[in-house]
Image: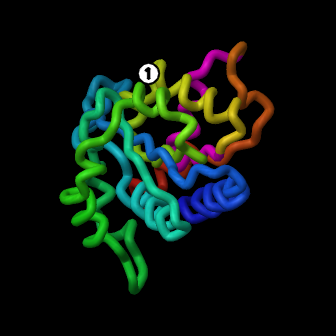
Amino acid sequence: MVQRSMLAIISLLCFSSVFSQRKVLFVMSAAKELQLKNGKTYTETGVFLSEFYLAYKEIISLGYEVDFATPFGIKPSIDKESLNKKYWKGRNSPLEEAKYFVQNNEKFNTPKTLENGLENINQYSGIIIPGGQGLMADLIYDKKIKRLLKEFSTKGKAIGLICHAPALILSIPREENPFIGYKVNSVTGLEELLLKIL
């Protein structure tokens, strides 16, 4: 599913290469906990590392510069589960490379705020929001993410929403939601359950 999402994003960016901007905004969760309906707390949540890093590598390989943004400019959090090697199968798995990146990349560790992303929206040809359950704790409640998604849509810019991220579309009130009528791919409850038991 992540591969299909990335292919769609890359296609959109290639299509949008007619724009002069060669920069993409990655919006990331900074949440570290997720309150569950059963009263329990899922700790060490955040961005799913493979859903971020594999998309990031593809985007920079196309010659795009990347900026990162989170609510309040807090360092993005990485879901501990996403460090499990079962999500990084293959001979050329970049897991160690990805872990090094999130520990040492200055732009990743000092992200911009969502306000900054809004103020500089014309610099970007696209926005990518990686999945992970963390966004269900912070981004989904943030009014600025609604504005970012609506602005990118209105301006005809590429929008890549990976795994859980399409849920953010549902946070926009129907009467002002530019995505009504669109078809999107998203993780299902069954897929979520299967991932936990595999």
- As for residue 29 lying within the magenta part, the answer is no
- Quadrant in which residue 37 is drawn: top left
Residue at 75% across / 42% down in the picture?
183
- Residue 168 drawn in magenta: yes
Up the image or down, 6 lies above or below 169; here it is below
Residue 188 percent across, percent down from the top left = 58, 45
For the N terminus, give its image quadrant.
Answer: bottom right
| Image coordinates for residue 12, horizontal then vertical, percent | 68, 54
Task: Give whichever of 108, 178 is nearer the camera.
Answer: 108
Q: Secondary structure at mark 1?
A: helix
Q: Is residue 57 above or below residue 15?
A: below
- Magenta region: 158-174
Name which residue type carries label 1: Tyr
**On the image, numbered disc 1 is attached to which residue?**
141
Q: Is residue 35 visible?
A: no
User: Circle 1: is it few (<14), some (14-19), or many (20+) Cα within 10 Å?
Assistant: some
Is 168 located above or below residue 28 in the figure?
Answer: above
